[in-house]
Image: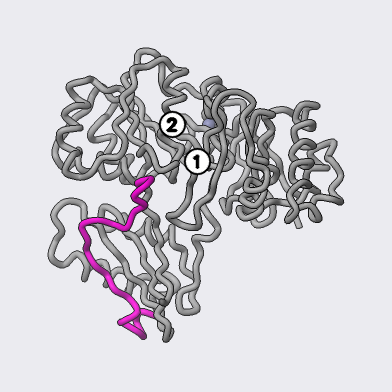
Amino acid sequence: MPEPEFLLATPELTGAHLDRVRAVLAQLRRVPALAERYAGVDPPGSLAGLAAVPVMVKDDLQLALAQLRPRAARGATWVFQSGGSTGSPQVGYAPTGLYMAEVYAHWRPLSRADVFVNGWSAGKMWGAHFLVNAYADLAGCVAMNLGGIARDEYDPWLEFFATRKVTAYGGTPSVLRLVFGHARAAGVKLPDLRAVLWLGEAWDRQLAEDLAAVAPNARRWGMFGSTETWVVATNTPDCPDDVWHPLPSQLVCVGQDELLDFTCLSPEVLNPVLRYRTGDAGQVVSCGCGNPRPALRVLGRRDQLIKFRGHLLNVDDLVAGLGRQPGVARAQLVVREPAGGGSVLEVRLLPAGPAAPDLAARVRDHILGSAFGPSIVFQRNPDSLEVSVVDTLIGNERTGKIPSLVVRPAG
Ligand SMILES: [Zn+2]
């Protein structure tokens, strides 16, 4: 088994880092369900020692948080919730300021000169909207809280962006893609827009194309993280969109099967995040942007590989491939698993503009004729594949995220 590879801004763990790791270990030992696992773990004195600390998974952290109920030393303790689109919701705690001072120190998409629109949905305990506002506060820009918008609101808001000379806009790629896709089709131009902030999902090639047509001066600035770890890493327009530079207080480890785990080394972090595995995979890379911090390529989630009627199906690859078909804005997979067996793969297509009458049939032929895993299943069992053109994809109302895969079990 290859040794785990740690990405750390300093050559070794500092004394303060080690104090933090020891404090979290002590917290985890106070959680009855985890006490036994951590009882025999020696407090590490180095990165090599940390490699011997067991990894935590989502349920472990949720058990620990339920027991520990963290409280901020000063100000309010904010509770946020993520998930729900691909799994059960995850809770995370954060103090006022939401740890954005460190992000601001290392990542500067916004300055005082900017007019920024926050397009992340607010409320229902999702953190992105509030986190970006904490960032805007540090940047000292003009900020507007728009939140998520529906399709019939795009035109007036795009006009508002143009007349108010909005220079920066942020949101989830699923939401941004629909807004900029619409703007491009409507011939909208936003020459003042120079920064697009994104967080919550992978970047999107179609979004990049639409953005270049609508706002030729705009460049993308990403944050990568989760409600439990908070912002782990950032990237700039000079980095590939899937390459990230972890912040100095975040220790990322590439372990077995390229699975990532995260350790928050800041003493202010309320969540006991110690070798916490989110399901994301990645690899250590070098980034040509000139940033001296180490770099990480995020490969996406390992649980996006599913078995359909005995054949492996890579959800991300299939959805990305279908999204490149002419006339398709975005695709989504729904797997229905009837009680009597015989799973059905439903491919939902959101058309780019008015749909051609043969769009569904054309995409179906493309899938049947392709060499990807289950196409043989569909050739033998034509009823196991359904392709339909839809007005809207199934999304998470709270976050605006659109999962690539929805599984509908029997019952
Ligand atoms: Zn870079």
Left or right of 389 in this view: 120: right
Q: Report the residue marked by disc 2.
A: 130
Amino acid tagged 1: Phe
Quarter of the picture holding the C terminus: bottom left
Can you tell which quarter of the image residue 233 is in?
Answer: top right
User: Was residue 390 drawn as part of the magenta stretch in this picture?
Assistant: yes
Q: Residue at position x 23%, y 20% from top?
A: 165
How many other residues sit within 10 Å of disc 2, few (<14), some (14-19) or many (≥20)?
A: many
User: In this view of the protein, can residue 178 be seen by the observer?
Assistant: yes
Packing grade of label 1 (10 A; few <14, some 14-19, many >=20) is many
Q: Residue 310, percent across and down?
A: 50, 78
Q: Quadrant of the N terminus?
A: bottom right
Query: Is 298 left, or right, of 271 in this rendering?
Result: left
Provide residue 368's location: percent of width, then percent of height. 32, 74
Query: With 350 as the anchor, is 407 left or right in this view?
Result: right
Q: Is residue 319 above or below residue 379?
A: above
Instruction: Using the image as rendered, state which of residue 46 and residue 228 is in the foreground.
Output: 228
Rendered residue at 36%/64% (across/down): 333
Q: Name which residue type carries label 2.
A: Phe
Instruction: Tell me if I can see residue 258 in this picture.
Output: no
Q: Quadrant of residue 22?
A: top right
Percent across and percent down for residue 116 are 33, 23
